[in-house]
Image: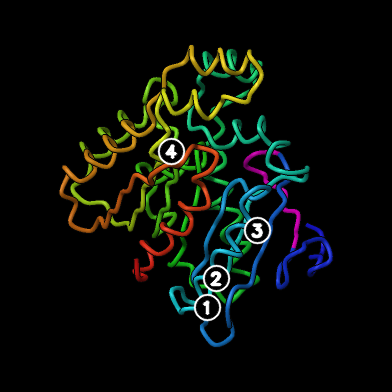
Amino acid sequence: MTDPDLDRNSPLAGTEVHELASEAIGDTFKIFVGHCGDLEASTPAPVLYVTDANGFFGTAVDTVRNLQLRAMLPPMLVVGVGYPMGGLIDTVAIRVRDLTPSTDQAFTDEWMGGTPSGGGPAFVRFLADELQPWVAARYAIDPNDATFFGHSFGGLLGSHVLLTEPGVFQRYILGSPSLWWNGNESFTTEAEFAARHDDLEATVFIGVGELETHEGRQRENANMPPEAVAMARARRLDMVDDTERFAAVLRSRNYPSLRLESVVLPDEFHVTVGPLHLSRGLRSVFDAPR
């Protein structure tokens, strides 16, 4: 671990940048930490954990701070989990390794040139056994008030944690989860959880953009190179249907301790809806006005 670079390596005030080596994965992560609100007056503070931090950390910090202007959120620590490389586009391959709960060889061969997938279980061990204790040892946080945010594959990973180790986080913001992964295996995971449990103690927000359908994806890819347009046409995905079905089946279980809100956000594509998931999701899981 390196010493934090307070404000010098980040354009955001009140933030830190660290490196944290993971034994569970055998790799080093770039950990971003944002101090949002008067944490000293509100200890112990909740923590928002953000995946894909190379692209979403700044958005998360600004969103939290904007909502705090009207006291919609308490002071909180924002912890982003990223990689020691560029921006989000530079992490496309490595995030497939960490945010997918199983190997989907057909997808990785077709779309990712054989990039390894299925490292999600090890990544969860990193989050639960390495990162969370690291945060708790350094900051005055409430270890029993952790919120997860993930978009796309991050939402897929969050749904996996929710249905396998729900106690790792208390609140979940699942943005456009890639429930299609590996033959819609998330629905199998859900059925297996339901067969073994009669309750699910969590506060959950699930969102998807209205245009995250097969037809909407064609519009979203209109300016892409011809090969990308052809690939989008060839692989039929309807993330709106997947997300609505997933939320419906969770509601059908009638878990006494599950608080669930799901929304379809109008006129939004997969690449435009992420920040809205953060804003709407935070307001939902923290019971803010909406």
Q: Check the image and report above or below for 123 versus 202.
A: above
Label 4 to label 3, Cα distance in Å? Answer: 21 Å
Marks 2/1 in contact by CB < 8 Å: the verdict is yes
Q: What secondary structure is marked by label 1?
A: loop
Q: Dot 1: few (<14), some (14–19), or many (≥20) neighbours within 10 Å?
A: few
Marks 4/3 in contact by CB < 8 Å: the verdict is no
Q: Nearer the viewer, mark 1 or mark 3?
A: 1
Q: What secondary structure is marked by label 3?
A: helix
Q: Dot 2: few (<14), some (14–19), or many (≥20) neighbours within 10 Å?
A: some
Looking at the image, residue 276 sits to the left or right of residue 15; the answer is left
Report the front residue among 94 and 271.
271
Q: Which mark, by number, is residue 212?
A: none
The residue indicated by pointer 4 is 177
Q: Which mark, by number, is residue 69?
A: 1
Marks 1/3 in contact by CB < 8 Å: the verdict is no
Q: Which mark, by number, is residue 58?
A: 3
Label 2 to label 4, Cα distance in Å? Answer: 25 Å
Q: Which residues are magenta?
A: 17-26
Looking at the image, the residue that sits furthest to the right is: 8
Q: Residue at x 38, y 55 (%)?
A: 167
Q: How is the image coloured?
A: rainbow
Type of amino acid under label 3: Gly
Residue 157 horizontal/vertical position (percent): 47, 40
Q: What secondary structure is marked by label 2?
A: helix
Q: Residue at x 43, y 74 (%)?
A: 72
> What secondary structure prevails in the magenta region?
strand
The residue indicated by pointer 2 is 66
Q: Residue at x 17, y 44 (%)?
A: 253
